[in-house]
Amino acid sequence: MNKANENDKLGDEIQELYIIVNHWISDVGFIQDEINFLLYVLNKYPGSNTSTGQELAKYNFDKTLIQLNADIPGLINEIRDYLKLLETTVKDPGKDINITLLEAFSSTYERVQTLLAAVKSVKKQLFACTEQIMKTEKASAKMKIIK
């Protein structure tokens, strides 16, 4: 394979990478919307028989979601900075790829994946806690009927 064909193939792969990384901004925006929805629901519908443990759990979920939400603008900026690095390589496919480009990709990819995993974990825990609260309230309502 000659040098021109190698550069064309590399240029295509870099353009594809650029598109994928650009989609990360949409993905992170979706995650931010999900966090905002969870915060809204968490603060909109307090339980009627909320225990101290449930209040503490709510506080911890709230605190975690707010922190995750606060990290998003920095992550979006990191993605945009990486896209700028990629742009120069897309415009000049013959330009050598240096280790900085690879390290920046790895770092940014890890941050996006960590955010996804954290939100998924919090959402799973939040839903499990909500189910427990619903069971507790249902049992409490039955006890009131029996009395």
Image (cartoon, grey):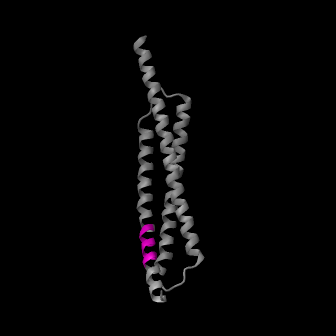
Residue that sits furthest to the top in the current view: 147
Up/down of 101 relative to 49, above or below: below
Q: Does 53 sit left or right of 35 as displayed?
A: right
Q: What secondary structure characterizes most of the magenta part?
A: helix
Q: Can see residue 5?
A: yes
The magenta stretch spans residue 17 = yes
Could you say which is closer to the camera, residue 4 or residue 36? Answer: 4
Could you tell me residue 40's position as x and y percent? 42, 43
Image quarter where the C terminus lies is top left
Q: Which of the 4 quarters of the picture holds residue 19?
A: bottom left
Could you tell me residue 71's position as x and y percent? 53, 57
Could you tell me residue 143's position as x and y percent? 44, 16
Q: Which of the 4 quarters of the picture holds residue 11?
A: bottom left
The magenta stretch spans residue 65 = no
Q: What span is colored magenta in the figure?
A: 12-20
- Point 44% across, 33% down: residue: 46
Q: Does 66 sit left or right of 40 as displayed?
A: right
Q: Does 31 sit left or right of 67 as displayed?
A: left
- Point 42% across, 78% down: residue: 12
Could you tell me residue 22's position as x and y percent? 43, 68
Label total for image: 0
- Point 44% across, 86% down: residue: 5
Could you say which is closer to the camera, residue 111 or residue 55? Answer: 111
Could you say which is closer to the camera, residue 26 or residue 50? Answer: 26
Up/down of 46 relative to 80, above or below: above
Q: Can see residue 92?
A: no
